Amino acid sequence: MTPQAPSLLPDDLRMLERGWLSSNNIVCLGDTPAVIDTGHTKHAPQTVALVRELLGDRPLATIAHTHLHSDHCGGTGQLQAAWPSAHTWAPVESLPHVQAWDEDALTFGGTGQRCDRFTASSALVPGDTVRLGNYDWQIHAAPGHDALAVLFFEPLHGLLISGDAMWENGVGVIFPYIEGSDGFDTFTDTLTLIEQLAPRVVIPGHGAPFAREGGAIEAALASSRQRIDYFKAHPAQHALYAAKVMIKYQMMDFESIPHADFKAWLNAMPLMPLLHQQHRPDLSREEWLHMLMESLFDKGVLRRTATHVLNGS
Ligand SMILES: [Zn+2]
């Protein structure tokens, strides 16, 4: 975590750059301070402390989310406990799932991930504009990585909060494809929308902000499209990428876990059988998992002792 130097952002907009397990947090200062995306549950106390450091005595007025993956909303419950008067916004189609705390619809069930419970009262509706901090942000639908995700775009300064719809390097797992609800083209359409919005600065869910000046946004659009086109042509490779991401992400949370507990988690995760079928249906489930794990151990992504699986480098 590094507080982002404000070079690309106005002074009253701060991005707390986190890592992979926790998404970045974007803090809008001003009369009604807001935070967009709240990191993973594991880092929630740190998120509260970082936001408090930026706000000083001023209470947090609003919590908003690009989408409700566990690395983007895991700190929300503790932020709500720290600032009980804060108003919480969620993408419109996710709002009923939060209110009913439907862990399957919220994806925590399917991915075997954890997220502290929180509440939300307001819907981020594509086409609407919401005021967060000192800026009016347009809400745009951003399906692809997550079917229900939204973007926040501030046209006067050309600021785009992209969540996981666009990073400077790489693309996120395309969850709707795994579940058979949508294809790769939807993600490409979201990239076309971003291109049409023509942002000056993109503030991503992971990694540092990047700018149009110097060509970083254009390069990110091109490399994202290229990656999605590759996955479209080789969907088995997308399944392999997704399986590795899901396991690594979980081990960043667990850090260390007995072999039997890890196996139980792996076997209980509903997305794994789908990824197995999409990657190597010719192998048995056990053979496939063995091959997957061995490749993660070989590369040092994970480590193991006689008793435990450990997170690696
Ligand atoms: Zn995500």
Image (spheres, grey):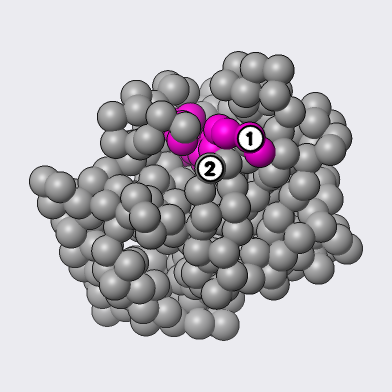
Residue at horizontal 57%, vertical 41%? 133
Q: Residue 251 vs residue 214: left or right?
A: right
Check whether the beta carbons of the residues at disc 1 and disc 2 lie within 8 A of each other: yes
The amino acid marked with disc number 1 is Asp
Position of the C terminus, as image quadrant, is top left
The image's mark for residue 31 is: 1
15 in relation to 158, above or below: above
- Residue interval drawn in magenta: 13-32
Q: Dot 2: within a 10 Å radius of its alpha carbon, few (fewer than 14), some, or many (20 or more) residues? A: some
Q: Residue 294 vs residue 57: left or right?
A: left
Residue occupied by mark 2: 134
User: Nearest the camera: 110 or 24?
Assistant: 24
Residue at horizontal 69%, vertical 69%? 92
Residue at horizontal 35%, vertical 73%? 193
Location of residue 252 by image quarter: top right
309 in relation to 184, above or below: above
User: Nearest the camera: 176 or 123?
Assistant: 123
Q: Dot 1: within a 10 Å radius of its alpha carbon, few (fewer than 14), some, or many (20 or more) residues? A: few
Helix, strand or loop under label 1: loop
Q: Residue furthest left?
A: 214
Helix, strand or loop under label 2: loop
Q: Is residue 307 visible?
A: no
Q: Position of residue 129 (x, y in %)?
A: 57, 64
The amino acid marked with disc number 2 is Asn
Q: Is residue 24 visible?
A: yes
Residue at horizontal 50%, vertical 63%? 138
Asked if the magenta segment contains residue 24, the reply would be yes
User: Nearest the camera: 288 or 201?
Assistant: 201
Which numbered disc, 1 or 2, marks the residue that appears first in the sequence?
1
